[in-house]
Amino acid sequence: MTQLVAFLPLAAPIALLVAACVALNDPSMRPRHALASAGIASMLALGAALAGVAVLVGSGPLTSPLIGAGGIGLSVRLDALSVAMLALVATVGVVVIRFSATYLDGDARQGIFTGRLCLTLAAVMLLVTSGNTVQLALAWIATSLALHGLLVFYGDRPRAVIAARKKFIAARLGDLLLIGALVPLTLAFGTTDIATILQAARDLPAAPAGVGFAAVLIALAALVKSAAFPTHGWLPEVMDTPTPVSALLHAGIINAGGFLAIRFADILVLFTPSLHLLAIVGGFTALFGAVVMLTQTSVKVSLAWSTVAQMGFMLLQCGLGLFALATLHLVAHSLYKAHAFLSAGSAAETVGETRALALLAPAPGRIAVAGGLALGVTVALSFGFSALLGIFGDDTAAATAAASPQAIALGAILVFGLTLMLVHAGPKDGAGASGATGSAPALPLGRLLAVCVAVTLAYLALHALAQTLYAGVLPPPPVVDVAGIAVMLLAVTSFALVTVFQLVEPARAASPAWRAARVHLANGLYVNTLFNRLAGAYTAPGHSKA
């Protein structure tokens, strides 16, 4: 009976599948039945997600019985990770469905869009609650195919068709990688049950050959699914699709790669090269996306490049073994970015103000002072927080993770971010405060310091909370080997160099070399060119070679 209650979250995808059938059969303008059924289904899905939370709190982690035979069928895994992801997808789904009802009002194919939207959400929910590897693979593929229908909703827009085609190619590669990983895993452990596989992996001292191979393929599948370099090109190009789709991407779709890495964290830690792969490629993607984002003039395209960077950073966290922190990042970024896309029309003024501030070059002395203040705040609060953990919790998972080298490396990256914030505080360097070569404006030092303290405390507290919540589900950060230390040093050094670049670049903005470099960066260093040729972008209907 206890295991049967694990089926409760299945009400979420079932309700959405019913709504999808209603909507797809009501394709008219302002389809009253389609919109009503989608709205009701989204609320039922949210209720089912909350019921899953209640079941988890009351009964602990569990897996439902398998509806099927021979390890192939439908089963639900309820643990802290699946419940968090289901709640995230359901919450974003409610907002996106409600928003799209107004956004597409008057569109002749609104019913079809609503049906495809519900179908995509149902597939994602089956993915994040999968209890066996077969269901996981099928839901992984179904999510991509359902999303494709949304990406080509405006089939008369060549750019939308090209972006969808590139996404389709990348997704099929991700499918092959995932299947190639799950087959040896299933054979090695003799079961398709994910919970059994993960528990057996925890008891292994090292990865057998097949498991190590599977770990690398899981890392590669995660990188491809979350648009890591060099398969990122389609993501900034899906802006010709309806805006609700851009928000929907953050409901367990673009971040499904992170979910996959976190779900199979116990497999990845058995073979550290897979972690190093995630860290190196994810870290480079984060830096690449952040730099290109600064050169974009479109708000939505800039947000898309920001997503590329954030997905890379999430995968970097996974590669460092900070899986609980990566989960927290996944949820927080999804909520923030879904809101950012849905409110993109009102974001232009804020983005413009932020860019105007970034174009002002601070003096070297101010950079040094800001870096010192940021370092002082982070170190002082970290020591204080660690002391509190030592007083109120002996040798907790949170205390152990907070003192790990991986957490220290991320703390160093946090210092760079705080430096960028504090560099504009205090009195002006001089009279000129406008133009690319002007001095930084005066901002209240006390207020910015308070924000830095709040950000650092939030980072430390949420890190500790995540480690505590996921202590029984996700493995602690692994012991760092020589290669791991090299990867961390590379990551910290790279982020330091990009921070310095962001600080000194405004002073060189007028130089011919930087103007030329800016053009190349705005085009993503033309990494997409080969992918465009593979996808037939230059022969698509309506495409101009000019």
Image: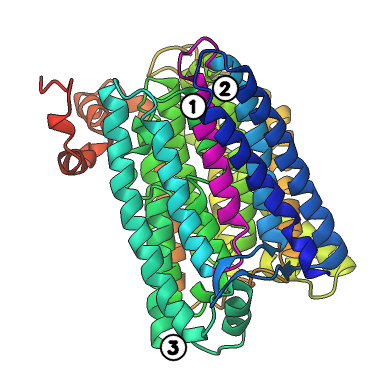
Q: Is residue 222 left or right of residue 84?
A: left
| 534 in the magenta segment | no
Label 1 sits on a secondary structure element that is helix
Query: Residue at left 39%, top 86%?
Result: 209
Q: Earlier in the sequence, mark 1 or mark 3?
A: 1
The amino acid beneath tag 2 is Ser
Q: Chief secondary structure of the magenta span?
A: helix
Name the residue beneath numbered marker 3. 208
Horizontally, residue 85 falls left or right of residue 165, namely right
Per the image, the residue denoted by label 2 is 100
| Residue in view at x 39 percent, y 38 percent | 148
- The label shown at residue 113 is 1
- Towards the viewer: 34 or 363: 34
Q: CA distance from mark 3 to mark 2?
A: 48 Å
User: Residue 32 vs residue 310: left or right?
Assistant: right
Q: Amino acid at mark 1?
A: Phe
For residue 109: magenta?
A: yes
Where are the magenta residues, as a range? 104-132
Quarter holding residue 180: bottom left
Whether tag 2 and tag 1 are in contact, CB under 8 A, the answer is: yes
